[in-house]
Image: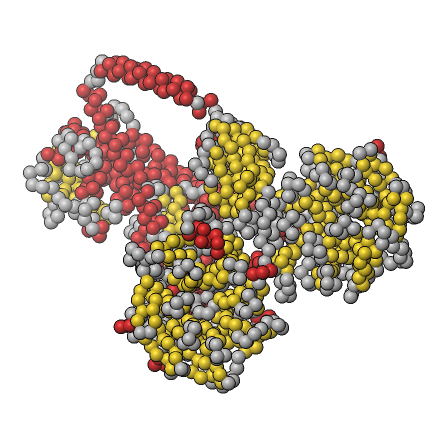
Amino acid sequence: MDEDSPIVYLVDDEPAVARALARLLRFSGFPTCTFNSPAEFLAAHDPGKPGCIVLDLSMPGMSGLALQKVLAERAAGAPTHPVVFLTGRADVSSSVEAMKSGAVDFLTKPVDDRTLIEAVRGAIERDQCTRRERRANRESLERLATLTPREREVLAHVATGKLNKQIAQELGTTEKTIKVHRARVMTKMGAGSLADLVRIADRCGVQP
Amino acid sequence: MAADVGQPSSIPVDQSDCIIDTWDSVQGLPDNSVTAIAQDKDGYLWMATFGGLVRFDGVAFTVFDQGNVPELPDSTVFNLHIDSRDRIWISTGKGLVVRDGKSWRRLGVTDGWSGGLVRSFAENDDGSLLITTFDERLLLADARGMTEIPKPTGSRWLGIAGADFEGHWWLSQPGFVGWRNGSAWVNVFGFPAELEHVSGPARDGNMWAVIGDELLKLDRQAIRTRMRLRESPGGLWGVYEDSRGDVWISTYDAGVLRVSRDGTARRFSIGRGIGSRGVRCVFEDREHNLWIGTSGGGLSRIKPRRVRVFGLESGLDESVVTSVCPDSDGVLLVATYGRGPYRLDLGTGRASQLTGDNEPTAYANCALRDHRGRIWIGSDGAGLSVYENQAWHRLPERGFGSQSIRSIFEDASGRIWVSAGEGVTVVEDGAPRLLAQDRGVPLASVRNFAQDPSGAIWFSTDDAVFRGDVPRFAEVRDFEGHALTGVTSFRFEQDGSVWMGTLRSGLVRLRDGLCTRIDSGFGLPECSIGGILVDSRGIWWLATNRGVVRVSGNELRDAADGRIPAIRAQRLSVPDGLVSGETFSSHQPSCVSDSQGRLWFATSRGAATIDPAGIAINEVKPPVRIESISAMLPQPGQASSTVPYGTSEHIERVLLHEGDASVVIPAGTRRLEVCYAALSFANPERVRFQCLLEGLDPAWQDAGGSRVATYYDPPPGEFTFRVRAANDDGLWNLEGASVHVKVNGFFWQSMWFRGLVALLVLGMGAIVAGAIGRARLTRAGERLTIERQRTELAHLSRVTLLGELSGSLAHELNQPLTAILSNAQAAQRMMASDNFDPGEIREVLGDIVDQDKRAGEVIHRLRRLLKRGEVETVALNMNDLVSDSLRLVSRELTNRDIQVRTDFERNLPWIMGDRVQLQQVMLNLLLNSADAMAGVPPDRRVLTVRTNADEDRVHVRVADTGTGISPGLEARLFEPFYTTKTSGMGLGLSVCRTIVRSHGGEIWAESGETTGAILAFAIPAAKGPQPDGRGQPDRVPGR
């Protein structure tokens, strides 16, 4: 298995269930790693590696939701592994709570293989996506360094959604000039559209 | 019918007088060889291609081939002709077909057709045709039929047919170009047979012929004009004269040569705008667009270029132009943002940088040449500089509000007015003076300066307009006292009125204090106006960020005076030659007219110019056609309203074909689509439509450029669909097209049916109400014994109890089921792979068996608890009974974050009792304690179960760490319907008391040692030794 291939972390307090799910995933081509308690998982978990978590919602000691919260706290803002929840009973409130705190899917046990695999695939894709985005983030920061001070000023104002006219007034120049600066900023930042630019600026934490 | 839609690709050509757009198979042509083009009476363009006959409406190509027209013997079309009766003659690879309206007819030997592929068609004013074919036949088709006629010299040479205005047939073939007199041919111009030849009609009624490299015009007597071409045209294929008198000589190997009346020639070929060297046909449509069909290079349209742009290719090193101003004659001053000022030589079209000592910054905002010939450059950040005697001189900083210059303006007395940051600077005798606020000059950035005929200076800021002169300015307001905001430009009229371009509100006329606004409501296509230019014919040209808008000044005045409701405006933008539509520069001067009347605009991609005298406006009303109407219906058998739009459960049906005047729409139609077209070809993407479904729409609906109107769930009824269109230059065809639409309804959509249904519902209601009343009477008559009621109650209470546990029980069952399903599916996947390990399968099967047993046990336990029936008294061990009960609720307790502690006394005396009922008591106590702890933090939820025995009784105590019991309420807990909980009936504990008492025992509640409550019960111990095995609770292996 190569270092960066995504791993499915399976957490279920029932060894029999964990074993069966792991088998299923392994034979569908997902490397898996099983844990029989949240504590065991927290001790071994490395958020830096790509993958996703398949988590039983109700476990003695620490519920799945609580575990999800701990993971989010540990990550401190950085993206965590996407979580697919499994539960014996799907009540609305806990599924809403799980989805709110970033679960990608909420599956009811017993789960059909296709449903599970689909969900795991989706979670891994999402994980890869966020990881790619983080890389793009780093790239954006590098691009940001190539801006002139004036261009950086213009970018900061653009990012707050100001009109060229307003920016021109604040920087004591004309709309046309701002427009030209803006076009250059777009090129340098590799942004295809204004929305793109605002997103990149936001990611880099550019503020006026 | 296969139709495809595609925007043409514009091939950049040299700065010339025309714009060429090309369509090929990417845009929907079935084949890239277009061999003939003609326009029918409706206005459609028809083309012969090697992939079929094609009809073009400017946007979509509709292909007619063997696939959809069985009468076509072949999909390869070599030539076509539309005759005066609008019939289309189609020469295919396997014979001639005539399309007449909707009918297609293949001509055969019985019709006199004997030829092969058609080389040329000619039509006489009486409607007869002369046809030459590649197999060297000459055929005459008239009212009597088709006959082969003799050729001039009896040769077997390939000829080209023609007809003059007087009805004489012409023919050219090697060595011969002449006309038919009766049954004899008269040669007007004999030439060596080895020279190539081609001929075609001239617009004055005579004939054009190209022989070798000579262009001749002939009448029946003699050669009228004869011109030797400066360059050999190439291999001759056709000759065509357009409405401007230019002659287009198409060749099969060197493109097409356009020869103007003055003899100048221009060649269009591959690399010069069109896609192939082989040009098969040239055709001019009613709007005077020229179409060129090529061999393998698709279809090209040539239209006049309205806007010319000088950008990078003219020698500017920066394309962002901020300002333009006429310099000396024939030279334009161009300010670029990035490379500073340039001089553009209008003769050569080349630009050169304005260099000199002390060059100002490269970021120029404004360029102005004053009446003394000095050049002023306003920069972004480096102030104002003046260029004189090959050197730059920068004006001192203190005279300006900032060093970013926005506008420069020279008044009639030669003063230079400058806007830089806040305030206004006047430069007089080379000295800048910043006007202070106390002179009525606002502390704001000025956009634009102007001088009215009386000599007063006007200027605008974003919020106001000011008028006056040094030393005093006053704000101009309308008579109601409103400020004039967002003014970008001024235009002073003879009658004293002032027109202003504005940032957002279009044009505003101020006359006698009254403001009249002309904006989109009047049909002005753009309401953000950066500048106004007026040409010598009174046409206004407005600089906007989406091209230049052209509108007649008279119309503007009429609209402002209320004489007309709308104006007609044209927009000149990228399709007309602009590289960028942004002609709204925020600087002054940015749009100017030069001494020759040409208009100049600063754009973000070069300096653009328009010659107002040379612009033709499209005055052809676009013919409008309704092409099809289709309905989307649910599949038969589907209830119409339950099926969402667009799912595969729908079928699409084309209901109206071209030419039908009315259409009937089936009941249950969910979506109705009407496709229509306007046959305007200069800029089809600019054609605008309006639709009206009379009877449903209250007014005409703007459809923009959309060529399809969609209606969802059309109600039953009769309607008229109307559509009208405006061409690219804003000329409306108000007649448009219309079709009658009848939408059928289902019978249940009618009023009488709905009334009937309402009556039926009322009747049913009455019957049902009667039946319920009778049922109640019967039940009231039933009697149950008290004993039976009690067991029923106990059972009911157990069922309720299990209901509370259902979540955890589901989990108990789900776990093994999950393991079983996943194991089984894993096994399926393993076995699907080639090399699976039988050992692994064995393991999986083992797991399945274990898990299945486990699920079975859960069910067994449940069944026992739910069993309804007689009380069964057996010997029991209280510890086992308690453990068993704990096992049932353990998941539930886990979910509620409750820790369980047990303290069992070993070797308890056994008791006699009903296992199910005692277990019920136990479960009730456990759940009660669990409920009591809902309000305390999870880490303090502890449930302790203790068993012990005194001399004659076995005790069970369930202690919680909850909120406890209020003093005095301990006894009431066990009364029926007493509850402190929000859910439940309050029967649980009272049933427990009944059960315990029936076992001769006692149940009570007390407060805990430190916190919480204790629920306890005691059952008399049985006498004697415990019987072996019998009555023991089944042992359940722990998980």
- The answer to whether residue A148 is seen in the rendering is no
The picture places residue B548, in percent across and down from the top left corner, at 51, 59
Where residue B841 appears, as percent x and y from the top left, is 51, 45
Residue B202 visible to an observer of this rendering: yes
- Percent position of residue B416, x then y: 41, 76
Q: Nearer the viewer, residue B402 or B185?
A: B185
Question: B232 above or below A11?
Answer: below
Q: In the rendered view, would you say A139 is above or below B76?
A: below
- Name the colour scheme: secondary structure
Residue shown at 48% from the left, 76% from the top: B371
Residue situated in front as seen by the camera: B86 or A163? B86
Which residue appears at 16% of the width and 29% of the height?
B994
Residue at image location 48% in from the left, 63% down from the top: B533
- Horizontal arrangement in the rendering, residue B664 relative to residue B29 (left or right): left
Q: Foreground residue, B1036 or A180?
A: A180
Residue at 37% in and 40% down: B814
Which quadrant of the view contains residue B889?
top left
A87 and B762: which is toward the camera: B762
Tell me: residue B469, above or below residue B931: below
